[in-house]
Every structure is written in C-alpha cells, then in structure tokens.
Image (spheres, rainbow, N blue to C red):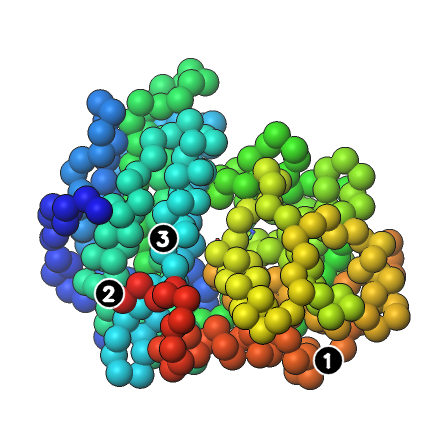
C-alpha cells in the first residue's frame, strides 16, 4: 500500500446537483461537479488533482487522437440505505487497467493509487450517487497519450483522468441479439482483452447495421470460423445450457469482465457447474430449439445482468423463455443487488467502502 496520495483539490464554485433531474438519467450523459486528473511525464505520474468538471485543453496533434493510444475502465459506486457508499470490486479494474496499459505501450499506475484516486473523487461527489433501485454512480477512469507528435511511436506523456456521473439502467428491456458472422470484435493476437478505445470504435458499424435490422445487440463470434461465441456487445455472454453455466474462457480476444467473474463465483457458491470454454453457435442454437438453453444474458458493469429475449442466426430468430420466469438470472440480479446496495452480507469482500 502506497502512502495516502497528495491530491490537490479545487472545488467547483457552484454545484450543478440541484439542477440535475435524478428521475431522468440516461446512461453516460450526466456528470458530477468534479473530475480527477494526473499527468505522466519523465517516467513518473504527477500533478494529482481534483478539479471542477469541465473541458480540457489539448493539442490537435496528440497521438491519442491519431493513433488510438487510449483506453478506459467502467466501475460503479452504490449508496446503501444507511448512507454508506461502496465501490464494487475496484481492485479488479485496477489490474485490468494495467493490462490495457501494457498492451497499448502506455504507463501503468500502481493499483492502490488507481483505487485511491477513484475513492477520493467518489467521496467528494458522494451526493451525486442516486439512492434508487437500479441506479448507481458510474465511474469512468481513462488514460490517453498527449505527445503532440505524428510519428507512430508510443507517446512519452499521458493523462489519466476519472469522471463520474449518476446512471440508471443501460438497457430498458430484454434484448433481441444477433449472432455476427461477418464482422469481428477481436482476433487472436489483437487487443480484445484490453479496454482499448479502438475496440469500441470498430464495433459501431456492425452494431449500427444490426440495429437497422431491428436487433439490440450483437453476439460476437471468433474471427477464424465465426462458429464460437465470444462476447455480447460491451458485455460478456453467459448461458445456462443443460443446467450448466457456460461462457467463453478468457483469452486474448475476451475482456476479463468483473461481472463475469462475480457471476461465476455466485454460481459456484450455489453448486451450479461452471464451464469456461469454447461455446459453439451450434450448441446454443440446438439448446434454443430443444429448450435446454434456459437462460442467456450479457454480464457487465453498465449492462448489469442483461437478459437475452431472442437469438438470431442465419435469418432465423429463436425466442427463449420469458425472462421474467428465469430462475438463474433473476436470482443473480437480486443477489448482486443485495450485496451492492448493502442489504446482505458481503461474504466475498467485493464492496470497497468509501
Ligand atoms: N466485454 C466488453 C467488451 C466490455 O466492454 C465490458 C464492459 O466493461 C464487459 C465485457 C464486461 O466487463 P465488466 O463486467 O468488467 O464491466
Ligand atoms: C462498462 O460496462 O463499464 C462498459 O465499459 C460498457 C460501456 C462501453 C458502456
């Protein structure tokens, strides 16, 4: 554990809290009063500061804009009924933050500093955390290259920032998903396991095409054969097939999701067999046809547990059971909420109290 960080704090002259409509919180559009900023130069992190939320000045030549040396994280903080504030498993995001940094030739940040910076900002803006079911404070740490240089080479300077904002549910209804068999999210040897900005940029065209066909999300498949399920949009894809929880094993094309890991831990607590392995499109379609695919959902921080209503493949749409009646994902959703909002004992020590 590093000593407590020396963070310079400049408070906003005016809080926007009273003007914010907490009954209308579309995901990712509302930001709190403050943001965190630090600079990397000459091989070290410095200028740790919390400032009023607002625009930052940048050179138009920064390499993040041209070559995509940029990545982010996504975490949530929750308000318990007694006013306690907790952040869900930020230590896991700290580890993944550094995996992304290494893949993109960017500097790492000591894990405890990552957690401290987030905790300090959440603490300062704790009044922004909605005290409402399915609502939380979304925390968005990110890093980007700031050298004003157009050579394709790793930058020598970077900015690490954290912004936060109150959010409601990312998805408002069960999803009609399509198995993508042309485009690829990530290939072996690529950077699918990193939360690189470019991974999300490249997903937008396929996602838009699917939306034009009426689908809510894509189920990504492997780059070589398009025969194995990898992820679901910006969430891990998880299935209950023949009584077993199955999901793609983590490898370089898969983001090692914190929610995925949490779901696996709960399933193991409940004695449900878990298989982290290649998940074939064929077995899912077969399971959808014969009724053995009893649950399917995306697992992610923004997505939470996002139920799949139907899976489409090769022009056929297969509807699964009514999501409201699904035992496993409903129990998961309720159990996770009870832990996050402090209503049940946190036996795994997942909540980091601020
Ligand atoms: N997969 C992708 C591509 C994502 O963007 C996310 C969202 O963060 C996830 C999976 C789920 O990860 P986590 O549960 O850590 O949010
Ligand atoms: C998250 O769940 O935190 C994500 O990063 C998804 C996001 C791209 C909306």
Mark 1 vs ligand 1: CB below 8 Å: no
Asked whether, in this view, residue 260 is left or right of residue 231, the answer is left
Say which label, 2 or 1, has the lower sequence index.
1
Q: Are marks 3 and 2 in contact (CB under 8 Å)?
A: no
- Label placed on residue 354: 2
Q: x%, y% of residue 339?
A: 41, 74
Task: Give the class, few, some or many, for how many residues have Cα within 10 Å of label 1's Cα (few <14, many ≥20).
Answer: some
Q: Which residue is mark 3?
A: 91
Pair 3/1: label in front: 3
- Can you tell which quarter of the image residue 52 is in? bottom left
Q: Report helix, strand or loop for mark 3.
A: helix
Q: Viewer-proximal residue, 351 or 122? A: 351
Q: CA distance from mark 3 to mark 1?
A: 35 Å
Q: Report helix, strand or loop for mark 2.
A: loop
Q: x%, y% of residue 80?
A: 32, 78
Question: Which image quarter holds the C terminus?
Answer: bottom left
Q: On screen, 353 above or below 212?
A: below
Q: CA distance from mark 2 to mark 1?
A: 38 Å
Pair 3/2: label in front: 3
Q: CA distance from mark 3 to mark 2?
A: 13 Å
Q: Which residue is mark 1?
A: 322
Is residue 17 something one can see in this rendering?
A: no
Q: On screen, 310 above or below 40?
A: below
Asked whether, in this view, residue 98 is left or right of residue 178, the answer is left
Q: x%, y% of residue 44?
A: 22, 29
Say which label, 3 or 1, has the lower sequence index.
3
Say which label, 3 or 2, has the lower sequence index.
3
């Amino acid at each position: 554990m590093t000593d407590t960080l020396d963070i310079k704090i400049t408070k906003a002259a005016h809080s926007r809290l009273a003007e914010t409509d907490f009954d209308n919180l579309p995901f990712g559009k509302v930001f709190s009063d403050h943001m965190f900023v630090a600079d990397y130069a000459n091989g070290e992190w410095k200028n740790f500061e919390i400032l009023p939320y607002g625009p930052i000045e940048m050179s138009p030549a920064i390499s993040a804009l041209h070559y995509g040396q940029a990545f982010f994280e996504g975490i949530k903080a929750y308000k318990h009924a007694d006013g306690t504030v907790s952040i869900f498993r930020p230590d896991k995001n700290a580890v993944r933050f550094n995996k992304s940094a290494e893949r993109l030739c960017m500097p790492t940040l000591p894990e405890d500093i990552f957690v401290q910076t987030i905790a300090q900002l959440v603490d300062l803006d704790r009044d922004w955390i909605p005290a409402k079911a399915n609502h939380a404070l979304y925390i968005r740490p990110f890093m980007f290259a700031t050298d004003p240089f157009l050579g394709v080479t790793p930058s020598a300077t970077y900015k690490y920032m954290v912004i936060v904002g109150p959010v409601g549910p990312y998805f408002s209804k069960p999803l009609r998903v399509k198995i993508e068999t042309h485009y690829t999210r990530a290939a072996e040897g690529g950077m699918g396991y990193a939360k690189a900005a470019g991974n999300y940029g490249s997903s937008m065209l396929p996602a838009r095409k699917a939306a034009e066909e009426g689908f809510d999300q894509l189920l990504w498949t492997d780059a070589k054969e398009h025969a194995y399920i990898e992820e679901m949009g910006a969430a891990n894809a998880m299935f209950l097939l023949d009584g077993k929880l199955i999901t793609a094993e983590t490898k370089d094309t898969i983001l090692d999701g914190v929610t995925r890991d949490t779901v696996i831990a709960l399933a193991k607590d409940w004695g449900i067999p878990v298989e982290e392995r290649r998940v074939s499109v064929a077995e899912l379609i077969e399971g959808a046809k014969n009724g053995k695919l009893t649950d399917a959902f995306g697992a992610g921080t923004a997505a939470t547990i996002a139920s799949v209503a139907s899976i489409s493949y090769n022009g056929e749409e297969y509807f699964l059971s009514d999501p409201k009646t699904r035992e496993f994902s409903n129990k998961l959703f309720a159990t996770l909420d009870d832990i996050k909002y402090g209503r049940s004992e946190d036996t795994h020590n997942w909540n980091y109290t601020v």
